Amino acid sequence: MIPLAELKQDLDLNKSLGSIIETMKTGSAIQLREFQTKARASDKLFSMLQDCFRTIAEKGSVKNPLFNGDKNLPSCIIAITSDDGFVGELNTFIINTALDQKVRADDEIVVLGERGANFFEDRNETFTAFPGISEDIKPPEIAGLKRHMIKGFLEKRFGTAVVVYPESSNVGSWKVSTAELLPFRESVISDGTRPIIDEELIIEPSVESVAEGLVHLWLNVALYNIFWASKFSEFGARLMHLEGSEQELVRMKQQLSLQYFKHIHAAADTTIREILSARLGLKS
């Protein structure tokens, strides 16, 4: 049986941990609520991009390397991990999915986040590291990753670029999603309808250059939404982990309290028996 003093210490520790987790859970909920005020890119912007791409497609086929991948080349697999605490399970799923996407030894792995980089480093995997995503999702973060993707694609170091990231529809659940961003496929953004084109419409300086500019803009929007989904999932996963930890502490407190009061009752019962035995002895 656990000594009474040790049970009392465990109960005090349980109470202290419960207070800490409650404070962390409140802070995480506030962070999540503040982050939700940062909206995703609007559907209206995607609709406008659809109109532009459909118009260009009607003017003729676009000959641009960003539209044409090479399946014989390696792939670029981008894993978005988190440096925040209490999201180890989320990072594990992201990393495992990224490794599942790697089918060739020369496939390139790109990791966002120090914790993900540490994992691949421990496995002696060759990878390119980028800093984790900030809560503000700053434009340089998007620009740096986009520049790396486009440069490697145009230099034919890889023929496809796939992003692996967490995504959730609500706070309580998340899943691992993959998105192929390069080569750009019009079907990703087009709904298949044919626009009404003015025969006098002129695209300057050329269809190819305008199409390339639109792809750059689309990548900015797509990466922003992916980063937003990743951060939202991180906040939700951390909040759910803390909620689970709080429930586990409550369960442990119930068990400790039961043992503590059993110990107290047993000690009281023993004392009463000893007093009664002593009084009986004196009478006899």
Image: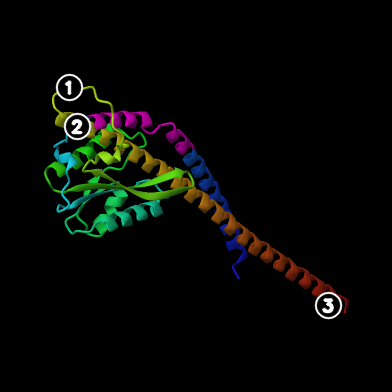
Disc 1 to disc 2, C-alpha distance = 14 Å
Q: Give whichever of 224, 199 is nearer the camera.
A: 199
Q: For the residue marked with disc 3, what is the amino acid?
A: Gly
Q: For the residue marked with disc 1, what is the amino acid?
A: Ile
First along the sequence among labels 2 and 3 = 2
Residue 211 is labelled as 2
Q: Pointers 3 and 1 in contact (CB under 8 A)?
A: no
- Location of the C terminus by quadrant is bottom right
The boundaries of the magenta stretch are 30-55
Which one is in front in this view, the residue at disc 3 or the one at disc 1?
1
Residue 42 seen: no
Label 3: which residue?
Answer: 281
Q: How far from the left and from the top, in percent, is residue 63?
A: 13, 37
Q: How far from the left and from the top, in percent, is residue 30?
A: 48, 36
* Residue shown at 22% from the left, 34% from the top: 215
Question: Badge 1, how many Cα within 10 Å: few under 14, some, many 20+?
Answer: few
First along the sequence among labels 1 and 2 = 1
Q: How far from the left and from the top, in percent, is residue 259?
A: 64, 64
* Residue shown at 20% from the left, 51% from the top: 75
Label 1: which residue?
Answer: 202
Q: Report whether 25 appears left or right of 258.
A: left
Question: Badge 3, how many Cα within 10 Å: few under 14, some, many 20+?
Answer: few
- Location of the N terminus by quadrant is bottom right
By secondary structure, the bulk of the magenta-drawn segment is best described as helix
Q: For the residue marked with disc 2, what is the amino acid?
A: Ala
